[in-house]
Image (cartoon, rainbow, N blue to C red):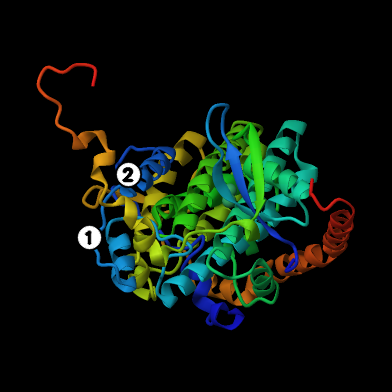
């Protein structure tokens, strides 16, 4: 299994994960993201009551499940490519949550108050939890956690490029919460309707937790923007640096996007990269005005005809460079993860030895 | 990790509700599985009780034989109250 789920081309993390896998089916304007998550959860339940039209043969039954917006479950028959795409996407998503702890973890010891420190700790701990929910979802597809960890540590599977940028000031923690978690939410809310049951359920849980992440970031920036001139400047500088990398999180433009049609047909992915990027921009403009901070794009303006904001695209060559390993922190991130993993080995071994000893002494368990 | 067993986690959200499957995790023994489950699945007081069950101990019906397996109930419509015509005027039925 290792071989065929390894990431073949450098482009592979531009297509899933924190990248381009979404769309909002009904996309009801004015509905909050949390409302959309709840709607997805309600729909999951009601779709399950629908009768399937398909025949009882494997492929037909699989297609009927997808057609009826029902969920494919771990022991159902599914096409090999469906399984492989999901393993790759869910694993990369999990890796992103795990590596994503590092940029913010960098500021835990230096948070400006005990309150901010407690909040940041809880946020980073949530990201660890997201990684674990997702690894568990991937394991239901027949891949083992060990294999996935190995694919990350050996660099054969990627994580979202955004985490290869450094966090230079405390305001970066605010900008990450607002922009990076914000973009992740726009990406992930549609995944709550993904056709694979364990992934959809994990995403519902994750999205409910994410909204606190975005709000705490927004609050940090709001506080700084209304503080001293130096604090305000620090907030603006962070937004300037994180804006375009956040736009790049949605992946390459639709014109360059490969294998997304099939993901759409399988209802793994529901919206195109460009649609989601546009949605994110439209959302941020209003929020930036509340922050009284500006977005670093002189060409950002309302287009009455399209009823969307026109904006400057991120630098996709830079995105490809970062994906290939040439971002500012790629090496540091993966080295840190390798070290954390190997330095934790004695804990895993001790726990296993203790469990084995206890199993001999009291075979009944707890 | 390969020999770290997988556990299925069930959480009772509130008193009076049933335990519901929420996901799985790896842990070397039952006690750590419970603690990990608490940290992983109830960080926001999502539950008042947790069960952990070794995944290997779960026996599941196979989706491939679902028809043969559940068929016996399919032709017994008379088990549902809607099968019966209630004469006009009969109350409390
Ligand atoms: Fe997350
Ligand atoms: Fe987050």
Residue A53 is labelled as: 1
- A91 shown above or below A107: below
Q: Have a look at marks 1 and 2 and say if they share a chain.
A: yes
Q: Name the residue beneath numbered marker 2.
A: A46
* Mark 1 close to ligand 1, CB under 8 Å: no
Return the x and y of residue A112 as percentages of the image width and height: 75, 37
Residue A145 is labelled as: none
Question: In the displayed structure, does residue B12 sit left or right of residue A22?
Answer: right
Q: State which quadrant residue A349 falls in.
A: bottom right
Return the x and y of residue A28 as percentages of the image width and height: 29, 42
Q: Is residue A305 visible?
A: yes
- B35 shown above or below A71: above
Question: In the displayed structure, does residue A91 sit left or right of residue A187?
Answer: right
Residue under the image location 42 percent in, 71 percent down: A82
Q: Nearer the viewer, residue B14 or A210?
A: B14
Q: Chain of mark 1?
A: A
């Amino acid at each position: 299994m290792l071989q065929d789920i390894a990431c073949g081309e450098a482009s592979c993390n531009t297509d899933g994960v924190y990248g381009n896998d979404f769309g909002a089916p009904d996309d009801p304007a004015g509905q909050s993201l949390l409302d959309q998550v709840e709607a997805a959860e309600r729909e999951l339940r009601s779709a399950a009551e629908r009768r399937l039209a398909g025949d009882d043969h494997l492929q037909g039954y699989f297609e009927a499940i997808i057609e009826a917006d029902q969920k494919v479950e771990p022991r159902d028959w599914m096409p090999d490519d469906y399984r492989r795409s999901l393993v790759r996407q869910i694993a990369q998503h999990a890796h992103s949550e795990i590596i994503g702890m590092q940029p913010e973890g960098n500021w835990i010891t230096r948070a400006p108050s005990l309150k901010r420190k407690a909040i940041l700790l809880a946020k980073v701990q949530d990201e660890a939890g997201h990684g674990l929910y997702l690894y568990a979802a991937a394991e239901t597809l027949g891949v083992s956690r060990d294999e996935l960890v190995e694919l990350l540590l050996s660099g054969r599977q990627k994580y979202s490029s955004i985490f290869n940028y450094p966090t230079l000031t405390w305001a970066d923690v605010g900008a990450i919460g607002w922009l990076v978690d914000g973009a992740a939410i726009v990406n992930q809310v549609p995944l709550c309707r993904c056709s694979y049951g364990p992934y959809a359920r994990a995403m519902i849980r994750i999205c409910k937790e994410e909204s606190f992440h975005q709000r705490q970031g927004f609050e940090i920036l709001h506080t700084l923007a209304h503080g001293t001139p130096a604090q305000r400047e620090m907030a603006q500088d962070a937004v300037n640096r994180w804006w375009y990398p956040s736009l790049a999180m949605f992946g390459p433009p639709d014109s360059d996007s490969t294998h997304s049609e099939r993901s759409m047909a399988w209802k793994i992915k529901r919206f195109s990269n460009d649609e989601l990027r546009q949605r994110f921009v439209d959302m941020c403009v209003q929020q930036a005005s509340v922050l009284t901070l500006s977005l670093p794009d002189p060409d950002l303006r309302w287009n009455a005809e399209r009823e969307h904001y026109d904006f400057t695209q991120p630098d996709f060559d830079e995105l490809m460079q970062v994906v290939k390993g040439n971002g500012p922190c790629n090496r540091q991130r993966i080295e840190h993860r390798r070290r954390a993993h190997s330095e934790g080995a004695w804990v895993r071994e001790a726990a296993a030895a203790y469990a084995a000893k206890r199993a001999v002494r009291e075979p009944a368990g707890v | 990790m390969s020999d770290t067993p997988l556990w299925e986690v069930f959480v009772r959200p509130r008193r009076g509700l049933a335990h519901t499957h929420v996901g799985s995790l790896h842990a070397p023994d039952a006690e750590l599985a419970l603690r990990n489950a608490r940290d992983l699945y109830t960080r926001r007081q999502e539950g008042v009780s947790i069960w952990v069950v070794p995944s290997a101990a779960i026996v599941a019906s196979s989706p491939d034989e679902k028809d043969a397996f559940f068929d016996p109930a399919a032709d017994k419509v008379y088990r549902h109250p809607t099968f019966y015509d209630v004469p006009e005027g009969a109350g409390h039925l």
